[in-house]
Image (tube, rainbow, N blue to C red):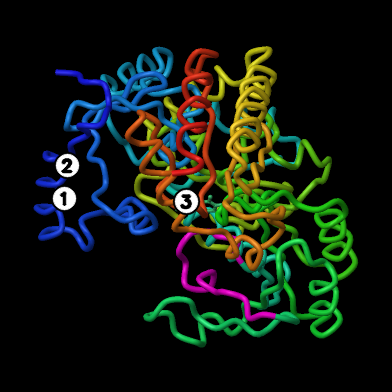
């Protein structure tokens, strides 16, 4: 039973399932943004996915621009990945012992990202950033870290910190349950503001273990680094002997094979991965300079472990996904699709006289209902979220599945063809003024 989405758009089954789920799971979900709180209404329950499409339990089909929040860059159930996972499953689900597949995936990452000389696989992006910071602290013997306002690095206590306004401030916890002691070593600065970082280093020259940054701030929509910002972070961390950590959980293998560091030609000391490197299965990783990575147990004293880390099914999905991405022309194809979308969206905005800002890097984009370019968290917060919600629902009813929040990035997959991109632009033209 497959209907096209229309005026008669019904969420009957999704609604029933959501009512039930809310009795069983906090908020009916296992990760907050899935509950559609940013746009109101009931979330869509998904039945299955294939290539560029998601199918919901009420018989609707959508072009998917969420892609499980990033991993599905090849599209869903890509044959090479499906075959690899099925073959791996037949050999056993988990051994808790070394396998060749772990070295194969490690080799693929190391060959793609020159700053990575050694790597440790974990099970999520959260684990990757948490472990990379422990490693940076172990390596430097220092406790303080710097993060940026609006950058998300997973839900570890020390990273759930929002910056105060103005000059960089001492961190205050963002969530109840995070003890103040846990975040007292977390210093914050505004994204794209290297001067604040310079001041922090001047105040604590011998205490800062690491600067952790999203090289594109993509958890407040899509905010590119301004020219010189990341370069200055590299310079300051070198000057003060602190570790520079690029959190490329989202941008790794997304904006280039070598991630954002390839595009900006900066070599961080450590890099965090997740999302795409697992091809849709739960994988995270941190890697970087050999000298630092050799501090990780059992090679060195920094303890970090995982029962399911390097899981054979997850490694198989990662190997198949990265192998596809390493084929010639893939990122050029993604860029071309991105350009088409950008041109179409900008035309739709112009034709409809809508004041909004389309920001894009490669196969990631965000349409902000904001007049001016978004450069940091405060400017992102100036967007009109009610307007975004109306746009979101109008797109959904036209068969376009977008992230249900103004502050998330949309993703383009290789499975999207030109006709689908055209369909998306038509839907946008009809929705930007909703
Ligand atoms: C998604 C994300 C994380 C967290 O990864 P999980 O797998 O959800 O724990 C960390 N950092 C960035 C930049 C992310 O986008």
**Residue shown at 87%/60% (left/top)?**
232
Q: Is residue 414 visible?
A: yes
Given contact means CB atoms under 8 Å apart, are the residues at marks 2 and 1 in contact?
yes
**Residue shown at 46%/33% (left/top)?**
430
- Mark 3 against mark 2, which lies toward the viewer? 3
Q: Is residue 95 magenta?
A: no
Within 10 Å of the Cα at label 2, are there few (<14), some (14-19), or many (20+) other Cα atoms? Answer: some
- Which residue does the numbered mark 1 point to in the structure image? 18
Residue 272 in the figure: left or right of residue 413 = right
Q: How far from the left and from the top, in percent, is residue 303?
A: 51, 62
Residue 321 in the figure: left or right of residue 399 = right
**Residue shown at 12%/40% (left/top)?**
12
Q: Does 226 sit above or below residue 118?
A: below
**Residue shown at 16%/50% (left/top)?**
18
Within 10 Å of the Cα at label 3, are there few (<14), some (14-19), or many (20+) other Cα atoms? Answer: many
- Which residue does the numbered mark 2 point to in the structure image? 14
Q: Does 39 sit above or below residue 265?
A: below
- Which residue does the numbered mark 3 point to in the structure image? 388
Q: Does 164 sit above or below residue 430?
A: below
Closer to the chain start, of discs 1 and 3, is 1
Q: Which residues are magenta?
A: 150-165
The front one of 224 and 312 is 224
């Amino acid at each position: 039973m497959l209907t096209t989405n229309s005026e008669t758009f019904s969420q009957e089954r999704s609604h029933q399932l959501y009512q039930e789920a809310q009795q069983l799971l906090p908020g009916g979900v296992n990760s907050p943004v899935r509950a559609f709180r940013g746009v109101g209404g009931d979330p869509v329950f998904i039945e299955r996915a294939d290539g560029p499409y998601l199918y919901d339990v009420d018989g609707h089909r959508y072009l998917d621009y969420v892609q499980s929040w990033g991993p599905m860059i090849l599209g869903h159930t890509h044959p090479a990945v499906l075959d690899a996972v099925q073959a791996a499953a037949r050999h056993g689900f988990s051994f808790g012992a070394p396998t060749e597949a772990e070295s194969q995936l490690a080799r693929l990452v190391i060959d793609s990202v020159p700053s990575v000389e050694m790597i440790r696989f974990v099970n999520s992006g959260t684990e990757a950033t948490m472990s990379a910071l422990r490693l940076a602290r172990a390596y430097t013997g220092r406790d303080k870290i710097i993060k940026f306002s609006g950058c998300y690095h997973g839900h570890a206590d020390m990273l759930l910190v929002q910056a105060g306004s103005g000059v960089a401030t001492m961190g205050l916890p963002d969530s109840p349950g995070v003890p103040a002691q846990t975040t007292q070593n977390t210093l914050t600065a505004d994204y794209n503001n290297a001067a604040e970082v310079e001041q922090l280093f001047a105040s604590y020259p011998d205490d800062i273990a690491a600067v952790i940054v999203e090289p594109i701030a993509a958890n407040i929509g899509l905010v590119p680094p301004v020219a010189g910002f990341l370069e200055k972070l590299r310079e300051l961390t070198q000057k003060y002997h602190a570790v520079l950590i690029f959190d490329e959980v989202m941008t790794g293998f997304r904006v280039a094979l070598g991630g954002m560091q390839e595009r900006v030609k900066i070599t961080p000391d450590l890099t965090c991965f997740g999302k795409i490197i697992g091809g849709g299965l739960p994988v995270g990783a941190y890697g970087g300079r050999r000298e630092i990575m050799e501090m990780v147990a059992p090679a060195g004293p920094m303890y970090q472990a995982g029962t399911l880390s390097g899981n054979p099914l997850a490694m198989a999905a990662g190997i198949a996904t990265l192998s596809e991405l390493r084929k010639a022309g893939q990122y050029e194809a993604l860029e071309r699709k991105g350009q088409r979308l950008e041109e179409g969206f900008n035309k739709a905005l112009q034709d409809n006289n809508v004041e909004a800002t389309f920001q894009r890097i490669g196969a990631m984009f965000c349409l902000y209902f904001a007049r001016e370019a978004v450069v940091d968290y405060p400017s992102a917060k100036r967007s009109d979220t009610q307007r975004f919600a109306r746009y979101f629902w109008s797109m959904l009813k036209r068969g376009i599945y977008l992230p249900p929040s103004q502050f998330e990035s949309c993703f383009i997959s290789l499975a999207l063809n030109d006709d689908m991109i055209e369909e998306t632009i038509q839907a946008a033209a009809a929705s930007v003024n909703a």
